[in-house]
Amino acid sequence: MNLSVQLAPGNTKGLLLDNPVMTASGTFGYGIEYQELFDIQRLGAIICKGTTLEPKEGNPQPRIAETASGILNSIGLQNIGVDALIAEKAPIWAGWRVPVLVNIAGEKIDDYARLAERLNGVAGISGLEVNISCPNISAGGAEFGANPDTAATVTAAVKKATSLPVLVKLTPNTGDIAAVAVAVAEAGADAISLINTLKGIAIDVKTRRPILGNVYGGLSGPAIKPVALHMVYQVAGAVSVPVIGCGGISTAEDALEFIMAGASAIQVGTANLTSPRAALDVLEGIEQFMRDEGVGDITELVGVARA
Ligand SMILES: Cc1cc2nc3c(=O)[nH]c(=O)nc-3n(C[C@H](O)[C@H](O)[C@H](O)COP(=O)(O)O)c2cc1C
C-alpha cells in the first residue's frame, strides 16, 4: 500500500511525505511537546506554530471560547520568534524523520521575505507555509489573503527569498477564494493549503461583553468542515498545484472527504486539542479504509468525488 504524496512537484527539492496526514499550524506547538505522547515520526509532516521576525506575546486573555461544534481563538500569533526557532527548535527537527514546515506570518510584505531568507538552508526545515491571514497594514487592515493581488505579491516575495518548497495558506475570509488560489499559483506557490479560521464573535450575556479579550476570533473545528470542504473542492478545480485540505478534520472519514474533493494531503487542527493523537488515529483510519476497499495507492482517491 502506498500512501506517499509529493506536495512540491515543481520544486527542485520537492516535498515528499510518507503519508498525507499533517498537523495544522498553531494546534501542535513545535511537535516536540508531543513526542512523549505518541510516535510523531509516523506523521506525514508537522507544521509548527506561526512564526514572526520578533517574538510575540499575543492577544489579551481570554483567547479561547467554545462554540457549537468548534472553538473561537484569538491567540494573536504568540510565538518565540524566528531567531529562537532557528537556535532551539530546528536542531531538534534535524534529527527527525518527519518533515517539519515553518508557518510564517508578518505585517508587511518585507517581513515575509525576511523570514523566508532567514529560514532558507536551515537544517531541520523542509518547507514554509505562508500564512496570509494577517492584517495588511499598508492597505488599510484587510488580510493579505483576501485579495488576489496582495496574495500574489506576498507569494512572489517569499519565492524569491527561498529555495524551500512554499505552501501558501489561504483564508476563507474573502469573496472569491478560487481567484486568490489562481493568483498565488501563478506567483509560484508550490502548493496551496486551506482553510484558515473563519472570523467570529461570542458574547457573554451576563457580563454583556464579548468573551474574547480581542473581541473577535477565528472559528475552527467540526463546525467549519462543510465550508472548508466546499472551498477545497473549488480551489482543486481551479489550480494544478497540489491542494492541502484543512478545517474540522477529526476522523479518517473527514480526511477522506477532503482527499476525494481534490486534496492531495490534509491537516488535522483543533482535533489535536481534544485528543493529542488525533492525527495518528486519522492516519490509521485511512490505512484501514484503503485495506478494506482494496486501494493500493492513496493518489487513486484524490479528487474521485469530482464528476
Ligand atoms: C489555537 C489555534 C491556533 C492557530 N494558530 C495558527 C497559526 O499560528 N498559523 C496559521 O496559519 N493557522 C493557525 N491556526 C489555524 C489552523 O491551523 C487551521 O487552519 C484551522 O484551525 C482550521 O482547521 P481545524 O478546524 O482542523 O482546526 C490556529 C488554529 C487554532 C485553533
Image (cartoon, rainbow, N blue to C red):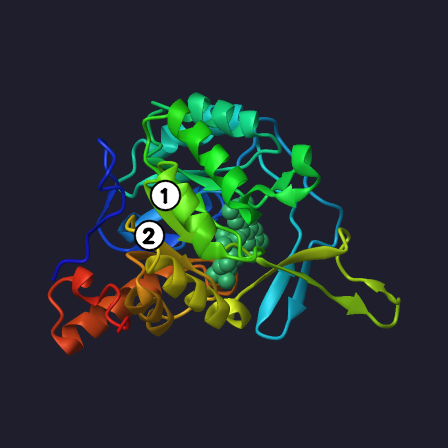
Does residue 273 lie above or below 51 as drawn? below
Looking at this view, is 124 or 168 the one in front?
Answer: 168
Residue 35 image offset from top left, x and y in percent: 39, 47
Residue at 24% in and 63% down: 302
Residue 97 image offset from top left, x and y in percent: 26, 41
Does residue 203 lie above or below 196 as drawn? below
- Element type at marker 1? helix
Using a 10 Å C-alpha cutoff, classify the residue at mark 2 as few (fewer than 14 neighbours), some (14 to 19) or many (20 or more).
some
Residue identifier under label 2:
239
Looking at this view, is 153 or 220 the one in front?
Answer: 153
Residue at 46% in and 38% down: 152
- Element type at marker 2? loop
Q: Amino acid at mark 2?
A: Val
Residue 127 image offset from top left, x and y in percent: 35, 36
Looking at this view, is 35 or 65 the one in front?
Answer: 65
Q: Amino acid at mark 1?
A: Ala
Can you say which quadrant of the picture contains the C terminus?
Answer: bottom left
